[in-house]
Amino acid sequence: MRNTRLLPIVAVLVATAACTDAPTPPPKPAPTVSASAVVAPDCPPPGVLITADRGDAAAGYREISLHLTNCGTTDYTLQGRPVITVLDDKQQPLKVTIGASFHYTADPRRITLKPGQGTSAVLSWHNIVTYGTVQNGAELEVAPVKGAPKQLVKLLAPMDLGTTGKLDTSAWL
């Protein structure tokens, strides 16, 4: 009699254990537009469009991904890191030191993007406030590589750099 009363409890415990959260799968790469896609009329020179996502934040560490899409009609080759200027809410440059990422350490590699293809780079910083003036970026000027035309990139959330004046960037991934 005693064992028959425990069976429903054991069944509930087993069912509950089966409902626990499974590990989150790694993020899938952003889909790219097919090579036969029509070139956007607002495709800036040199035939690539750079945008930023909302980013992630945790315990003072911040990240934003830049996404570069070849919106032109020919292949676009790049190698290196994006060239970045952080702008305040009046579009004035902030004094920010840009360095290589400590978290995304892949060496810059040569990437050739066909029309419609894209790649990303990750910007990261620590929102540390010690002394001095807090800096908040509102927009970025970004060139895909040194010497290329810069584009104004709107940020979906302020870039709260704290007082460190440091921003790290990965190579184009």
Image (spheres, rainbow, N blue to C red):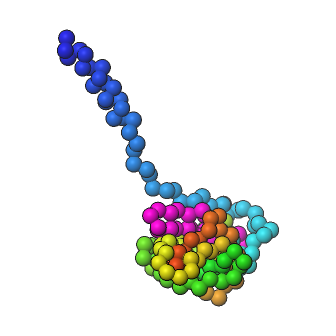
User: In this image, 133 relative to 128: left or right?
Assistant: right
x, y percentage for residue 156? 65, 64
Residue, far left: 2
The residue closer to the viewer here, 39 or 135, is 135
The residue closer to the viewer here, 133 or 90, is 133
Residue, far top: 1
The residue closer to the viewer here, 61 or 13, is 61
Tally the numbered discs: 0
Can you say whether 7 is above or below 70 in the image?
A: above
Residue, far right: 41
Q: Is residue 155 visible?
A: yes
The residue closer to the viewer here, 106 or 1, is 1
Q: Residue at x 47, y 62 (%)?
A: 58
Q: Residue at x 50, y 68 (%)?
A: 62
Q: Quadrant of residue 73?
A: bottom right
Query: Magenta segment range?
Result: 50-76
x, y percentage for residue 142? 64, 78
Q: Is residue 68 magenta?
A: yes
